[in-house]
Amino acid sequence: MNLRTRLTAWYGGVFLIAGAALIAINYFLTVAALPDAAGFAVAAAEPATPGLVQDRVFLIEEYRSDVLGTLLLWSVVALVAAAVLAVWLGWVVAGRVLEPLQSITATAHRLEAERLDQRIGLDGPDDELKELADTFDGMLDRLAGAFDSQKRFVANASHELRTPLAVQRTLIEVSMSGPESTPELERLGRHLLDANERSERLIDGLLQLARSDRGLATRSPVRLDQIVTDEIESCAYLAAERDVEVKSVVRRWVVEGDPVLLAQLVGNLLRNAILHNAPGGHVDVRVDGSLTVTNSGPVVPADAVPGLFEPFRRLRADRTGSTTGSGLGLSIVRSVVRAHQGVVRARPNGGGGLVVEVNLGETQVRQPL
């Protein structure tokens, strides 16, 4: 039972109690005001006319009974009718009273960590409800400021870290190509370049994650099918290197959003499906009202699927203990999907691998061409 129903029940119950008390008071006052048959018989007793007195007493008693019965009947009818009206009015009044609370609840439902731009902005007298709404808006202002500060820090730190990594890569490559280079130095250089590349991928992932977490400043029509085709071509070398076959069924489709972020979303899904696969495996891509990427590979436990969308969460490492990615691929996918007000779901694929489905939400421009 919701609060509005409970308030209506309280209004109706209070009215019934007050109405019943009013009927009882009115009944007893009427009883006191009507002629008393016993008193009349004592006052009018005459030895010569006993039959006349008895007739009058009977008439008075019948009159009292008829008046009280009619009064009680119509009082109950009026109470029932008024109770129905009171319940209806109580429902309406409760709705008006709770309307600010419904506005607060609706705003809270629309909020996410990446969408803190919603405000209640309640108008009206300075009562307790307006104070609650203003307090809620103030809290959202502080949260939005904190999240923006955190995202700016991540973005700025990622930008600052890219410069020294580029310098390190150049120094390593120069040392490896120098005349005094030895096999041991080249082997060490390759390890350092691998570590440098992993660091660059991590920083690039953090940049994309910070950018998508800030949401979309502008939107434009984007050919999602074309982006999928381009990303499949760009991942062809990686798929051939890993001995993974990529098959696609792509329907021409237009979505509204950011083309760079959508390309990052598709690319991350494809690279994740190829890297976490087995030699001779396959990746199936389908665009038909939604984007679905299915890959073969190791068996993925169902309880491990939700954690794959968390940053730096990996299912397993290879024999050397290193990983094939930065652990941000699916985190970026989820962040980009949320920035486009969409939904991403994943489930284990029968026989091994993962099925990831992306729905970007219906818009006016999301129509097949």
Image (spheres, rainbow, N blue to C red):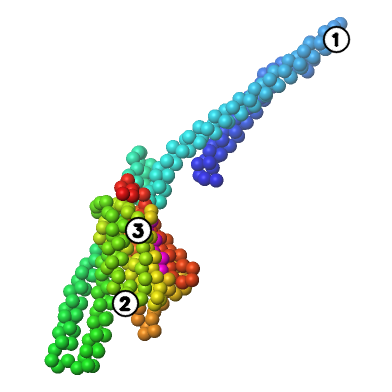
Q: Position of residue 103 (x, y in %)?
A: 39, 44
Q: Which residues are the magenta region?
A: 290-295
The local secondary structure at tag 3 comes to strand
Q: Which disc number belongs to residue 296?
A: none
Residue at 50%, 32% in the rendered image:
89
Label 1, on which residue?
A: 50
Mark 2 neighbour class, 10 Å CA radius: few under 14, some 14 to 19, many 20 or more: few
Q: Earlier in the sequence, mark 1 or mark 3?
A: 1
Distance of label 2 from label 3 (alpha carbons): 24 Å
Q: Position of residue 112 (x, y in %)?
A: 36, 56
Label 3, on which residue?
A: 250
Q: Earlier in the sequence, mark 2 or mark 3?
A: 2
- Which residue type does callout 3 highlight? Val
- Which residue type does callout 1 highlight? Pro
Mark 2 touches mark 1? (CB < 8 Å): no
Residue 11, placed above or below residue 324: above
Label 2, on which residue?
A: 241
The local secondary structure at tag 1 comes to helix
Q: Earlier in the sequence, mark 2 or mark 1?
A: 1
Mark 1 touches mark 3? (CB < 8 Å): no
Which of the 4 image quadrants contains residue 54?
top right
Question: Magenta stretch: dominant SS?
Answer: strand
- Which residue type does callout 2 highlight? Glu
Residue that extends furthest to the top in the rendered view of this protein: 48
Distance of label 1 from label 3 (alpha carbons): 111 Å
> Which dot, 1 or 3, sits closer to the camera?
3
Which of the 4 image quadrants contains residue 286?
bottom left
Asked if the stretch drawn in magenta spans residue 304, the answer is: no
Mark 1 neighbour class, 10 Å CA radius: few under 14, some 14 to 19, many 20 or more: few
Which of the 4 image quadrants contains residue 230?
bottom left
Q: Position of residue 203 (x, y in %)?
A: 26, 71
Residue nearer the viewer, 46 or 185? 185
